Amino acid sequence: MAIRMVLALLMLLSVATASESTWGDTPNKRDPVYQLNVDDYPKFQTEMVLKNGRTIRFASVKAMLHFYFRPYRYPEYGVKERSEIAKMYVRDYLDGKRIDATKAWYVFGSRIVGPHGDDLIPLSSKTRAELYVKRHGGTRIMPFEKLTLGLVRYLDM
């Protein structure tokens, strides 16, 4: 009887742990790439909405881009190709407003460091990105189309 109780307890714990690190009806708590608690970094938080309606949250732009460029590396989320992604959202670093990631401008080389080291800082317009660079530094301002896996890997060096 004691063995059954222990086994039942272990099964409950494994289910609770799995649901916290993965996702179902509620958004994930942990970043799929760096395993950071997403809610600990509200200024850097990003979201990816899949065509099936599910949402994946990330602790930073860099983490979301790692997933975007190679979704097959995270099989637990069931995304095999980029074509399964409907929308991506980032937060404008200056005012925290949620914006479409593909329409944002990104600052590279800023003095501001993200949750997992060097990161890209998203802003809603090129003008806001230029203002950000004057305040916090930065070596380059880029639209989403210029972001590459090579750049994301470089940020992790």
Image (cartoon, rainbow, N blue to C red):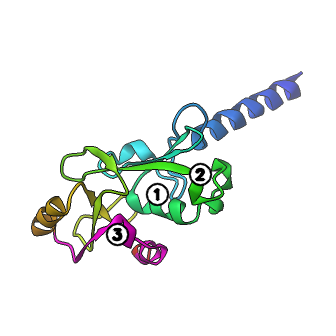
- Magenta stretch encompasses residue 142: yes
Q: Give SS at disc 2.
A: helix
Between 103 and 11, the residue placed more toward the observer is 103
Alpha-carbon span between mark 2 and mark 1: 14 Å
| Number of numbered discs on residues | 3
The residue depicted at 43 percent of the width and 50 percent of the height is 88
Q: Dot 2: few (<14), some (14–19), or many (≥20) neighbours within 10 Å?
A: some
Instruction: Inspect the image, locate mark 2, and give the three-letter code of the amino acid beneath it.
Output: Glu
Q: Give SS at disc 1.
A: helix
The label on residue 118 is: 3
Instruction: Inspect the image, locate mark 1, and give the three-letter code of the amino acid beneath it.
Output: Met
Residue at numbered disc 1: 64
- Magenta stretch encompasses residue 56: no
In this picture, is 60 found above or below 56? below
Task: Residue lying at the far top in this picture: please name it.
Answer: 1
Residue at numbered disc 2: 84
In this picture, is 127 found above or below 51? below
Task: Residue lying at the far right in this picture: please name it.
Answer: 1
The residue depicted at 63 percent of the width and 53 percent of the height is 79
Q: Is residue 22 left or right of residue 148?
A: right
Q: Dot 3: few (<14), some (14–19), or many (≥20) neighbours within 10 Å?
A: some
Residue 95 at what x, y percent from top left?
A: 19, 46
In this picture, is 108 found above or below 68? below
Alpha-carbon span between mark 3 and mark 1: 14 Å
| Magenta part of the chain | 137-154
Q: Earlier in the sequence, mark 3 or mark 2?
A: 2
Q: Give SS at disc 3.
A: loop
In this picture, is 107 found above or below 14? below
